[in-house]
Image: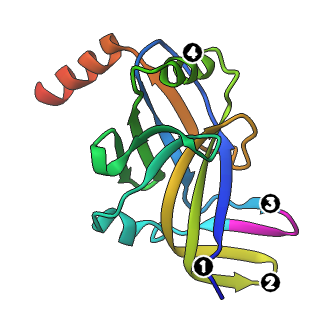
Amino acid sequence: MADALEIRASALASQGQGRTVSGYCAVFNDPVPICDFEEVIAPTAFDRVLDGDGDVLALYDHETGQLLGRRSAGTLRLAKDDHGLRFELDLPETQLGRDVAELVRIRNLTGCSFGFVVRDEAWQGQRRTLKDVDLREISIVAQPAYPATTVAVRSRQTAKKEAYRVWTL
């Protein structure tokens, strides 16, 4: 059987103005109804992806023709903490990049989604736990499935304040 690409969507929040979008594209241990079962993402789900150098795309609405960034180019950065899988995406200076920034800022785009191939999972009744996945892409979408995730458009001023805070600790 061929590897099946699965897609999950999630909720966004937006603030500010800027060229960087950041937030959580997956939240750990948060049960979400998917079709006729409940899905949970284990904290180990993305470990192999994060430890490797494989590429992950950042897309608009899961469309490869609507490329916003990619890990191999350094425009998409991924990191894990106790809460979930965090992303930071530098939007391109293209019409699509400007449109996505504005649509997130005014909250017309309210979802973050991801496409993946399952490598290891556990079923307990109607609950599926994703233990290990190959993350292929994250997408900014209009209809989310995971309500606990977030995204925000950061301004240059906010980014400068954050950088200053890091260097002055």
The answer for how far apart the CA atoms under marks 2 and 4 are is 42 Å
Q: Most prominent secondary structure in the magenta stretch?
A: strand
Q: Sort mark 4 into few (<14), some (14-19) or many (20+) by Cα contacts within 10 Å.
A: some
State which mark lies toward you, 1 or 2: 1
Label 4, on which residue?
A: 102
Which amino acid does the dot numbered 1 rest on? Answer: Asp
The answer for how far apart the CA atoms under marks 1 and 2 are is 23 Å
Label 3, on which residue?
A: 33
Label 1, on which residue?
A: 3
The answer for how far apart the CA atoms under marks 2 and 3 are is 13 Å
- Sequence order check, earlier mark of 1 and 3: 1
Give me the disc on residue 125.
2
Which amino acid does the dot numbered 3 rest on? Answer: Pro
- Sequence order check, earlier mark of 2 and 3: 3
SS assignment at label 1: loop
Residue at image location 73% in from the left, 84% down from the top:
124
Quarter-wise, where is residue 19 in the image?
top left
Residue 169 appears in view: no
The answer for how far apart the CA atoms under marks 4 and 1 are is 35 Å
Which amino acid does the dot numbered 2 rest on? Answer: Gly
Residue at image location 28% in from the left, 63% down from the top:
53
